[in-house]
Image (tube, grey):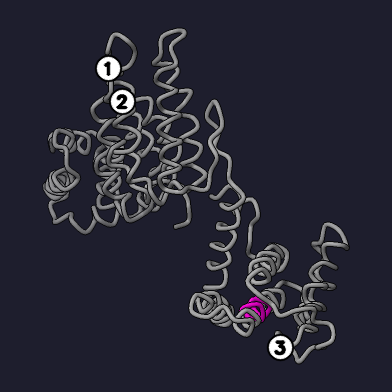
């Protein structure tokens, strides 16, 4: 589990929104006004993905203005000399705006176009709709009209809110922004001096974070702060994503992860040495892939990189690299006299965490702001 809200978004309806809104508020036992979903969906819409081409055609068909534009465009392309009054009259008589589904609307405008043009219009209409679906301005404008229409209807807002899936959301940062904004939205539904609703929301959100082990601390009044374990998990997740794009890096990443799993069976010093070696191999390959780097060993690569905040940070990596080369059996035969004791699980944990911490300097594709806040 990545510890992100977006991964468990489907659980929020049962765990947060229903107990928040369906339970009575205050000593009088009054329920929350139903139009709260209008405000919640308004906030949620700010974090929704804008529609893409695969779903844009259906969106355009359900939007009256966009549908008329597609009708007009098809007619004018097929017969440029057609009088605008005739085209407008044909669309109005089609009754397309009187039906709800995209399929029914398309069938009606197709029939009206065929009668107007005196020829089958299915292919012409499809071509026009596809062209409009690739026009970002038209699609976004139609989408905004649809959202505004939903926001102005309490039942439609509730339905849209409940049906929103994780893939509809723009990313983890958008979800976090929405969850924080909800607190202010709820304040507008409370009476002066009564914080029952916002306090209930805070507690439900806190319980949700604990239940699903999410990577956040919740602070008053409602601020979601990434935790250090969460940041580390995020770093490893992004490292997997980067290495998966290259066959060589992917193999090294899998070797490292497999060496960690092998410790479950046998945590001998031999296997610990192997896991450290596999991690150094991975970091070395990441450094070699960094733009402008021509060196091959991790120590030499660290000298060539220019992104260090201080020489001592660079020297820290070089010291770790020297350790892996000098300690017997990790990367080389090493110097037996320099080994103070056999490596154990203390070293596996400490060295693995230390080496992973250098990944943002060595891996060109890692965005530290995304690691911390997510997208």
Q: Residue at x 17, y 42 (%)?
A: 101
Q: Which residues are magenta?
A: 275-282
Q: Nearer the viewer, residue 139 or 297?
A: 297
- Label 3 vs label 2: CA separation? 62 Å
Among the 4 quarters of the image, the one containing residue 303: bottom right
Q: Choose the circle earlier in sequence order: 3 or 2.
A: 2
Q: Which mark is residue 166?
A: none
Q: Residue at x 25, y 30 (%)?
A: 156
Q: Residue at x 29, y 50 (%)?
A: 57
**Majority secondary structure of the magenta segment?**
helix
Q: Is residue 276 magenta?
A: yes
Q: Is residue 328 left or right of residue 80?
A: right
Among the 4 quarters of the image, the one containing residue 148: top left
Determine contact: label 1, label 2, CB under 8 Å: yes
* Label 3 residue SS: loop
Q: Residues within 10 Å of mark 2 (few under 14, many from 20)?
A: some
- In percent of width and height, residue 142 lies at 35, 38
Residue 152 in the image: above or below residue 15: above
- Label 3 vs label 1: CA separation? 69 Å
- Name the residue tied to disc 3: 329
Q: Nearer the viewer, residue 276 or 144?
A: 276
- In percent of width and height, residue 330 lies at 70, 84
- In percent of width and height, residue 306 lies at 82, 65
- Name the residue tied to disc 1: 31
Q: Which mark is residue 21?
A: 2
């Amino acid at each position: 589990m990545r510890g992100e809200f977006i991964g468990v978004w489907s659980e929020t309806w049962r765990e947060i929104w229903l107990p928040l809104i369906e339970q009575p508020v205050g000593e009088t036992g009054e329920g929350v006004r139903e139009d709260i979903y209008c405000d919640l969906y308004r906030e949620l819409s700010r974090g929704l993905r804008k529609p893409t081409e695969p779903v844009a055609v259906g969106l355009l068909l359900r939007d009256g203005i966009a549908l008329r534009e597609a009708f007009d465009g098809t007619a004018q392309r097929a017969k440029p000399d057609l009088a605008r009054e005739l085209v407008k009259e044909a669309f109005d008589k089609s009754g397309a705006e009187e039906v709800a589904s995209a399929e029914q609307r398309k069938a009606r405008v197709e029939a009206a176009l065929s009668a107007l043009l005196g020829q089958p219009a299915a292919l012409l209409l499809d071509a026009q709709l596809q062209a409009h679906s690739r026009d970002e301005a038209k699609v976004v404008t139609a989408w905004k009209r649809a959202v505004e229409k939903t926001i102005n209807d309490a039942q439609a807002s509730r339905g849209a809110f409940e049906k929103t899936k994780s893939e509809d959301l723009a990313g983890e940062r958008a979800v976090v922004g929405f969850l924080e904004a909800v607190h202010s939205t709820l304040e507008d539904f409370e009476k002066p001096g009564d914080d029952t609703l916002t306090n209930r929301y805070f507690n439900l959100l806190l319980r949700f974070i604990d239940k699903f082990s999410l990577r956040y601390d919740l602070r008053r009044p409602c601020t979601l702060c990434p935790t250090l374990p969460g940041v580390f998990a995020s770093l490893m997740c992004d490292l997997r994503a980067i290495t998966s794009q290259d066959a060589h890096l992917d193999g090294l990443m899998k070797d490292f992860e497999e060496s960690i799993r092998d410790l479950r069976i046998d945590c001998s010093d031999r296997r610990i040495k192997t896991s450290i070696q596999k991690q150094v191999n991975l970091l070395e390959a990441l450094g070699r892939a960094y733009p402008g780097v021509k060196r091959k060993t991790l120590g030499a690569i660290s000298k060539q990189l220019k992104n260090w905040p201080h020489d001592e940070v660079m020297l820290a990596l070089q010291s770790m690299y020297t350790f892996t080369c000098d300690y017997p059996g990790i990367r080389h035969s090493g110097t037996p006299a320099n080994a103070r004791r056999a490596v154990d699980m203390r070293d596996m944990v400490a060295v693995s965490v230390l080496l992973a911490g250098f990944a943002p300097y060595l891996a060109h594709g890692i965005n530290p702001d995304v690691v911390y806040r997510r997208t």
